[in-house]
Image (spheres, rainbow, N blue to C red):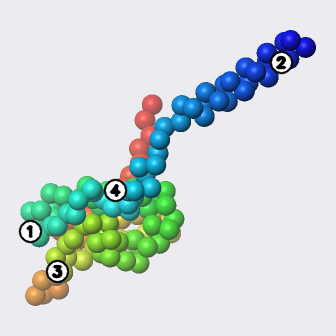
């Protein structure tokens, strides 16, 4: 009887310790997890776009792999999703997201020109497994 009581007490203590050691995650409620950065990112020049946009779009591509709702929204409204995430692009910049049935997701950035549009950036997210 004493062993059963000790066992039950030990199980209770392990459970209580696990509960007690939980990190305080309340700060997550105060964060907007849809943002790409703590501060707004305003990309005005071609150099800024070439320098910073690939990293931002890499984050977006990665999220499309794990978040179905984000995938659908980014597929339909990539420029708007970037803006809601705090990334502002000039009106001459067009972001297109493509996900064909069996192909990898791809983001292409174009700049509007007098003669149509010019491709600036194209990104595909490829996962590589190594041993």
Question: Gap between marks 4 and 3, in whole Å?
Answer: 22 Å
Whether residue 8 is situated above or below residue 41 in the rendered picture? above
The residue under the point 33% across, 71% down is: 84
Tell me if mark 4 has few (under 14), some (14-19) or many (20+) residues whose alpha carbon lies within 10 angstroms of its own.
few
Q: Please report contact status of discs 4 and 1: CB closer than 8 Å, yes or no.
A: no
Instruction: Please indicate whether residue 60 sits to the left or right of residue 112 in the image.
Output: right
- Residue for badge 4: 59
- Sequence-first tag of 4 and 2: 2
Q: Kindly identify which residue carries mark 3.
A: 92
The answer, for residue 75, to whether it is visible in the render is: yes
Quadrant containing the N terminus in the rendered view: top right
Residue named by callout 1: 45
Q: Of label 4 and label 3, which has the lower sequence position?
A: 4
Mark 4 near mark 3, Cβ–Cβ under 8 Å?
A: no
Q: Nearer the viewer, mark 4 or mark 2?
A: 2
Quadrant where the C terminus sits is top left
Label 4 with label 2: CB-CB less than 8 Å: no
What is the distance, in whole Å, between disc 3 and disc 1 at their CAs?
A: 11 Å
- Residue 90, relative to residue 50: is it above or below? below
Residue 74 picture quarter: bottom left
Q: Residues within 10 Å of mark 2 (few under 14, many from 20)?
A: few
Check disc 2 and report the residue beneath it: 5
Q: Position of residue 105 (x, y in %)?
A: 40, 63
Disc 3 + disc 1, Cβ < 8 Å? no
> Quick one: label 1, few (<14), some, or many (20+) residues within 10 Å?
few
């Amino acid at each position: 009887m004493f062993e059963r009581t000790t066992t039950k007490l030990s199980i209770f203590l392990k459970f209580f310790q696990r509960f007690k050691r939980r990190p305080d995650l309340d700060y997550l409620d105060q964060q907007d997890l849809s943002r790409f950065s703590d501060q707004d990112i305003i990309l005005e020049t071609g150099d800024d776009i070439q320098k910073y946009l690939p990293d931002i779009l890499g984050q977006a591509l990665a999220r499309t792999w794990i978040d179905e709702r984000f995938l659908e929204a980014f597929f339909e409204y990539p420029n708007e999703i970037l803006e809601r995430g705090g990334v502002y692009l000039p009106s001459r910049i067009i972001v297109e997201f493509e996900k064909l049935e069996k192909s990898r997701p791809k983001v292409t950035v174009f700049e509007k020109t007098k003669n149509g549009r010019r491709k600036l950036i194209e990104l595909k997210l490829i996962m590589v497994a190594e041993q």
